[in-house]
């Protein structure tokens, strides 16, 4: 018998609802809040107010696209954390209300695990699987062993996330928020002519705050016009440097741990240089390399749904007392 | 027969109740700050259980729509909006200030005093509403920085019942009013006497649009733009 799973994701500024029939995505609706760009970052209070209005619309749209009636849903999966507490609270309590009304079980999902599980939507990577997760809030290396839900974080960022470094550096360069895609865009037209020092961090951990400060001081040597003029080369050099920091650790971990397959996940995996270099790395080491579709890289409810599906199979349910966590 | 589930998560009190027609069937009230996220859904489940009412038999939902704690309000709204959608039953909103005042209507009638209902809004502010001795809203004062001219006018022209957790603060900023007053800063259960209010709202079908229904935040989001 197939299971119908409703999934809700409201961890940051995107409101998303997905409907899955087992592993098949019947709908994956994402509504982005564009209002934040004018403030140079996500405003938490604004984000949670918007979720409360958008969630209802997004749910109705998802049900319409999937041609499913709410009453047929077998379980409700939701993001428990990490994320913005105010945003998470809206999604969690909306899910709880549905659970009470429909008398169906809840499944609490960790947002970071879900980014990794996004690979299981279209593929079934061979285990152990080593995943580099890079987003605006997180940077970590995770080893998935034994089964898709068995995660071991082997390295994480000690300060800023890689995506955060992209956004903050973009701000220094006078680019709009979110800056990552803009850096990627300008980088296409430039050459990596500048060399920046690499952070020397032991094990598989990352650090970007020192790098960010270095760039800040470096850019201060330029006049505003020079920055404008050199923008493509600066963006290309910065992008290369950040990606190399990530790839170096990824390479080290692959060599040490010898996984059977590897992949990348999270919003920054939309970055063209990162995608290219991970694919190259996989080819060089002759290891199956998975890069999820773009729509499953950024925040979305389909990945919450697929994680929910595996948790449902292992009877791992949440309850009405479930509370969110920020980190 | 109407069966109404009522929820108030707008203050540090988390309260749920079930009314059948005008009568309170059962209620649970938790005086504990910062637990709404964990407890609100559990309390709804519990009140349904002790009332022995299957959730499908509910005919209406009602919620305290603020003013109050933003976080608390969002928890309540998210819960009841999804219940309303899944059960296909209408949702009603009532002012937190008007709701908590209903318990004091019998005294107000007896004394012939109007009610000044208020909530502490942090620093030297309160949310306040002026309500007649029958429990009807006369004047919504919104967010008041104390001392406040409207509150001063009320206290210098009427004997009043001052109720709610901002009552002491009002008297600190408006000391020794010339008329008599009765002070009730402590509310036992803000949704225990809503029969009349709910019946009126149901009779007038004051149902809310599920998409646009939002808490009464009173204030817009305050955003300062970084100068860096």
Image (cartoon, coloured by chain):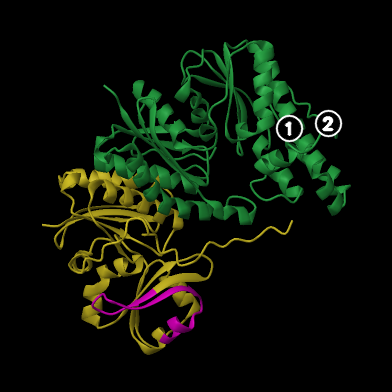
Q: Residues within 10 Å of mark 1 (few under 14, many from 20)?
A: many
Q: Residues within 10 Å of mark 2 (few under 14, many from 20)?
A: few
Question: Seen from this angle, which residue lies furthest front?
Answer: A189
Residue A28: x and y in percent read 42, 37
User: Which chain is rendered green in the image?
Assistant: A
Between tags 1 and 2, which lies in front? 1
Q: Would you say B171 lies left or right of A315 here?
A: right
Label 1, secondary structure: give it: helix
Q: Color used for chain B?
A: yellow
Residue at 45% across / 50% down in the picture? A51
Going 81% across and 39% down the picture, which residue do you hit?
A233
B135 or A238, which is in the foreground? A238
Looking at the picture, do discs 1 and 2 lie on one chain? yes
Where is residue B70 drawn, in percent x and y? Answer: 45, 57
Q: N-terminal of the two: label 1 or label 2?
A: 2
- What residue is shown with label 2? A197
Compared with A114, B145 (above or below) is below
Q: Position of residue A264 (x, y in %)?
A: 59, 25
**Residue at (47, 19) in percent of width and height:** A148
Span of residues in magenta: B129-153
Q: Position of residue A78 (x, y in %)?
A: 41, 37
Q: Is residue A41 magenta?
A: no
Q: Which residue is mark 1?
A: A242
């Amino acid at each position: 018998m197939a299971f119908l799973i409703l999934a809700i994701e409201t961890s940051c500024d995107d409101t998303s609802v997905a409907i899955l029939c087992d592993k098949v995505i019947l709908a994956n609706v994402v509504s982005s809040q564009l209002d934040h760009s004018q403030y140079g970052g996500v405003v938490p209070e604004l984000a949670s107010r918007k979720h409360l209005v958008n969630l209802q619309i997004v749910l109705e749209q998802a049900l319409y696209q999937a041609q499913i009636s709410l009453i047929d849903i077998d379980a409700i999966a939701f993001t428990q954390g990490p994320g913005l507490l105010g945003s998470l609270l809206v999604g969690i309590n909306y899910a709880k209300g549905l659970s009470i009304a429909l008398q169906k079980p809840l499944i609490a999902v960790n947002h970071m695990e879900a980014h990794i599980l996004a690979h299981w939507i279209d593929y079934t990577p061979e285990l152990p699987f080593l995943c580099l997760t890079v987003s605006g809030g997180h940077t970590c290396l995770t080893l998935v062993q034994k089964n898709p839900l068995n995660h071991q974080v082997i390295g994480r960022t000690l300060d800023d996330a890689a995506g955060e470094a992209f956004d903050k550096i973009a701000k220094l360069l006078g680019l709009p928020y979110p800056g990552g895609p803009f850096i990627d865009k300008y980088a296409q037209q430039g050459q990596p002519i500048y060399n920046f020092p690499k952070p020397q961090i032991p094990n598989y951990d990352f650090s970007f705050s020192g790098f960010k400060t270095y760039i800040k001081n470096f850019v201060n040597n330029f006049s505003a016009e020079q920055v404008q003029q050199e923008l493509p080369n600066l963006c290309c050099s910065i992008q290369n440097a950040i990606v190399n920091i990530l790839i170096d650790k990824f390479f080290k971990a692959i060599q040490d741990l010898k996984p059977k397959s590897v992949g990348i996940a999270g919003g920054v995996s939309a970055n063209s240089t990162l995608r290219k270099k991970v694919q190259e790395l996989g080819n060089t080491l002759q290891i199956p390399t998975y890069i999820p579709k773009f729509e499953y890289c950024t925040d979305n409810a389909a990945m919450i749904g697929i994680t929910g599906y595996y948790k449902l199979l292992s009877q791992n349910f949440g309850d009405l007392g479930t509370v969110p966590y920020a980190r | 027969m109407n069966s109404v589930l009522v929820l108030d998560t707008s203050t540090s009190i988390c309260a749920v109740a079930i009314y059948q027609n005008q009568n309170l069937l059962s209620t649970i009230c938790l005086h504990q700050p910062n637990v709404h996220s964990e407890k609100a859904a559990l309390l709804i489940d519990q009140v349904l259980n002790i009332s022995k009412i299957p959730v499908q038999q509910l005919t209406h939902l009602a919620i305290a729509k603020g003013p109050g704690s933003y976080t608390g309000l969002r928890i309540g709204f998210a819960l009841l909006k999804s219940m309303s959608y899944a059960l296909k039953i209408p949702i009603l909103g009532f002012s937190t200030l008007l709701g908590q005042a209903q318990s004091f209507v019998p005294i107000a009638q007896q004394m012939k005093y109007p009610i000044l209902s208020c909530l502490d809004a942090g620093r030297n502010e309160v949310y306040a509403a002026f309500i007649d001795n029958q429990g009807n809203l006369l004047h919504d004062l919104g967010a008041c920085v104390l001392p406040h001219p409207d509150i001063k006018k009320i206290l210098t022209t009427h004997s009043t019942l001052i109720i709610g957790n901002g009552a002491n603060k009002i008297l600190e900023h408006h000391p020794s009013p010339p008329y008599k007053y009765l002070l009730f800063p402590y509310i036992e259960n803000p949704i225990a006497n809503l029969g009349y209010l709910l019946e009126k709202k149901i009779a007038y079908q004051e149902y809310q649009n599920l998409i646009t229904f939002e808490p009464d935040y009173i204030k817009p989001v305050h955003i300062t733009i970084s100068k860096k």
